[in-house]
Amino acid sequence: MNSTPYYEAIQLIERLHRHFLDVLKVELDKKGIQDINNVQSMILYNIGDDEMTVGELTIRGYYLGSNVSYNVKKMVENGYLVQERSVHDKRSIRVKLSQKGLELKTMISDMFARHENEISGSEITDERLNALGDTMKMLERFWAKQTSAYGGGF
């Protein structure tokens, strides 16, 4: 198959995602954190200061629902998340970060800030990152249209 810019972009997105998860794993290992994995850490980071249901987390973070449920369960068991029944809908369970979760979120934020400082002054400029973000958002909208045309979607 001939490689096209579109196909190369798809492969690069997938590779970058795996590389980033590896970077996060190294960070967790350096801190001696072994009771949460890199994917769970990003779910936790995306919850941030909010309180939300697993369904909301799936929609906002574009995670697969079954994986989110399992990962949330593990993070509750390991003390990173607190879960409570929704006041408005007793069938719904809301989650928020515990103190341990907030500390990990801070660690990840510090890692991001450190990375931004390290790339400052390099060829990876804010302008390039903004252009990349714009392109990725266009791809996201394109793919969302492709899935919604068949009844799927985010």
Image (cartoon, rainbow, N blue to C red):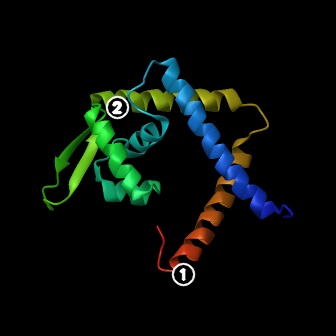
Q: Position of residue 33 (x, y in %)?
A: 43, 23
Residue 55 is drawn in which quadrant?
bottom left
- Which class describes the residues within 10 Å of circle 1: few (<14), some (14-19), or many (20+)? few
The residue at 45%/27% (across/down) is 107
Instruction: In this rendered view, identify the residue nearer to me: 66 or 7.
Output: 66
**Residue with the most extreme front position:** 1
Q: Position of residue 98 (x, y in %)?
A: 27, 33
Side (left or right) of 110 relative to 80 = right
Q: Does residue 130 appear in the picture of this structure?
A: no
Q: Give whichever of discs 1 and 2 has the lower sequence position.
A: 2
- Which class describes the residues within 10 Å of circle 2: few (<14), some (14-19), or many (20+)? some
The kind of residue on which mark 1 rests is Ala
Regarding mark 2 in the picture, which secondary structure is present there? helix
**Residue with the most extreme right position:** 2
The residue at 67%/51% (across/down) is 13
Q: Position of residue 112 (x, y in %)?
A: 55, 33
Quadrant containing the N terminus in the rendered view: bottom right
Taking 7 as reference, is 99 above or below it? above
Q: Position of residue 47 (x, y in %)?
A: 37, 45
Q: Nearer the viewer, mark 1 or mark 2?
A: 1
Side (left or right) of 113 relative to 86 = right
Residue at the spot of label 1: 149
The kind of residue on which mark 2 rests is Leu
Side (left or right) of 20 relative to 33 = right
Residue at the spot of label 2: 102
Cα separation, mark 1 vs mark 2, equals 39 Å
Q: Does residue 124 appear in the picture of this structure?
A: yes
Instruction: In this rendered view, identify the residue nearer to me: 77 or 81.
Output: 77
The residue at 47%/57% (across/down) is 62
Regarding mark 1 in the picture, which secondary structure is present there? loop
